[in-house]
Image (cartoon, rainbow, N blue to C red):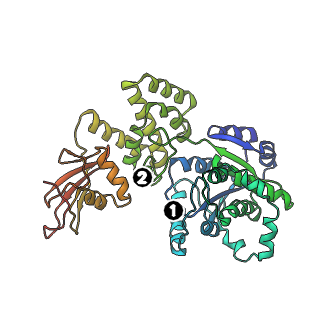
């Protein structure tokens, strides 16, 4: 399983803290495959590069023969994780939970190996659906009100006068017990999940099992350089983003993010990362070239060197030579639209209308080389070229009957 110190040193590049590091060294030295807990609630199936930091660390361990146990929190999703929330989460339908589970599996397979020798899928409804109420009360009896209220976001909600539903207080207990039920040796999480996973160690020890090791990972800001990556803020790079979108978004980041992004999101040697950081600090063409190297490294990791070369050439053609790309996709729509916002909603169906409205008002949309900033701008049924964002282009053609195409005169 490789030398424990070497394995831990490799993981440390994207590690914030390790709870139980001595246990991790001992378990790696023992030579048996570790069971690595990767638990998700099925509320938001859009994974981004921030989530992938944890996945790549797990992938490194999979390549050494360790097993990722992918826990789909179908039961706890019905409860709702209160982490980072100022209000109670809405309850999802069973159909929505099932659809999100399928999407999660598709996305994690972009990084994780899914062959059965190193990947197992579990659902926590397996042990909770059949748990007698007396057993559940027994679990709750092992955690005090003071322990739960020590969590900062619970305290913040109380101080702000916001209600906390009882089922939200139970959520950390359920997530903690998951670690016992699935016999977790190790879990790799963001620092916002440390409280819940510490409860996992608590239950394992109380129930006669060695406590899991908890690794918390580095969290980087989103594309705006401030808040962490979030779909609602439209400041993230999705795992399912195209090579072009990944490349273009990385070219838009503030200069000071080059170093943390290169360190956390790539496998570039650390001396190369330091050189890129120095170039970014210089600003101007040097910073631009550092971002080109960063963007190429990220695209290579997810899509291969060929895709990275293609996107680098396309970016240079578009921005250095100020020309349109030669491979603009053509869209023919079969339903009428009346405004620019409707047009973007039709050609970018995976994004919300609020995200698209923000894109327009920020001046990131041009139609036939004319910048549009008003989402209500009318469109006419003629051919046009739409640019939405730094590198997203579409050619729009009228529908067969000439009435249903979103175009602009």
Residue, far top: 282
Which residue is painted at 43% across and 22% down in the image?
282
Q: Is residue 33 visible?
A: no
For the C terminus, the quadrant is: bottom left
Tag count: 2
Q: Nearer the viewer, residue 52 or 100?
A: 100
Decide which of 20, 96 is in the foreground and name it. 96
Q: Secondary structure at mark 1?
A: helix
Q: What x and y, as percent, mark residue 180?
A: 77, 62
Q: Residue at x 78, y 50 (%)?
A: 31
| Residue 160 to residue 337: above or below | above
* Residue 347 sits in quarter: bottom left
Q: CA distance from mark 2 to mark 1?
A: 13 Å
**Residue corresponding to mark 2:** 241
| Rendered location of residue 339, percent (x, y) | 22, 59
Counting from the top left corner in percent of width and height, residue 316 is at 31, 36
> Depth check: 2 or 158 in front?
158
- Give the side of residue 23 with respect to residue 347, left or right: right
Which mark, residue 106? 1
- Residue at 42 percent across and 49 percent down: it is 234
| Within-10-Å neighbours for mark 2: few <14, some 14–19, many 20+ | some
Report helix, strand or loop for mark 2: loop
Lateral position of residue 320 relative to residue 62, left or right: left
Q: Which sits earlier in the primary sequence, circle 2 or circle 1? A: 1
336 sits to left or right of 143: left
Residue 196 seen in this snapshot = yes
Q: Residue at x 45, y 41 (%)?
A: 223
Task: Indicate the position of residue 217 as horizontal and vertical percent values.
Answer: 63, 44
* Residue 352 quadrant: bottom left
Relative to residue 103, is residue 47 depicted above or below? Answer: above
Q: Is residue 313 left or right of residue 32?
A: left
């Amino acid at each position: 399983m490789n030398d424990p110190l070497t394995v831990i040193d490799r993981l440390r590049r994207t590690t914030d803290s390790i709870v139980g590091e001595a246990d991790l060294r001992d378990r790696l030295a023992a030579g048996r495959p570790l069971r690595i807990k990767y638990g998700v609630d099925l509320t938001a199936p859009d994974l981004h590069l921030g989530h992938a930091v944890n996945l790549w660390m797990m992938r490194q361990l999979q390549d050494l023969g360790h097993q990722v146990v992918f826990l789909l929190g179908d039961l706890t999703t019905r409860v709702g994780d209160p982490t980072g929330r100022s209000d109670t989460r809405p309850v999802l339908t069973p159909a929505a939970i099932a659809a999100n589970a399928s999407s999660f599996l598709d996305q994690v397979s972009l990084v994780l190996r899914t062959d059965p020798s190193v990947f197992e899928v579990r659902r926590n409804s397996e042990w909770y659906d059949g748990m007698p109420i007396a057993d559940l009360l027994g679990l709750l009896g092992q955690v005090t009100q003071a322990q739960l209220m020590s969590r900062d976001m619970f305290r913040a909600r109380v101080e702000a006068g916001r209600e906390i539903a009882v089922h939200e207080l139970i959520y950390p207990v359920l997530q903690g017990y998951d670690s016992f039920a699935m016999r977790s040796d190790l879990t790799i999480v963001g620092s916002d999940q440390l409280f819940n996973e510490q409860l996992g160690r608590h239950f394992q020890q109380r129930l006669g099992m060695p406590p899991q090791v908890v690794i918390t990972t580095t969290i980087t800001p989103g594309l705006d350089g401030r808040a962490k990556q979030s779909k609602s803020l439209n400041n993230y790079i999705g795992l399912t983003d195209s090579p072009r979108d990944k490349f273009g978004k990385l070219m838009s980041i503030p200069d000071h993010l080059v170093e943390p992004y290169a360190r956390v999101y790539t496998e570039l040697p650390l001396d190369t990362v330091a050189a890129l950081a120095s170039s970014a600090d210089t600003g101007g063409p040097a910073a631009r070239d550092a971002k080109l190297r960063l963007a190429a490294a990220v695209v290579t990791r997810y899509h291969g060197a060929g895709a990275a070369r293609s996107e680098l050439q396309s970016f240079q053609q578009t921005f250095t030579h100020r020309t349109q790309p030669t491979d603009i996709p053509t869209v023919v729509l079969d339903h009428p639209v009346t405004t620019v916002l409707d047009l973007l909603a039709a050609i970018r169906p995976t994004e919300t209308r609020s995200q698209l409205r923000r894109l327009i008002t920020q001046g990131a949309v041009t139609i036939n080389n004319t910048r549009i900033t008003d989402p209500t701008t009318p469109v006419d049924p003629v051919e046009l070229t739409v640019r939405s964002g730094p590198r997203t282009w579409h050619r729009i053609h009228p529908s067969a009957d000439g009435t249903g195409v979103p175009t602009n005169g």
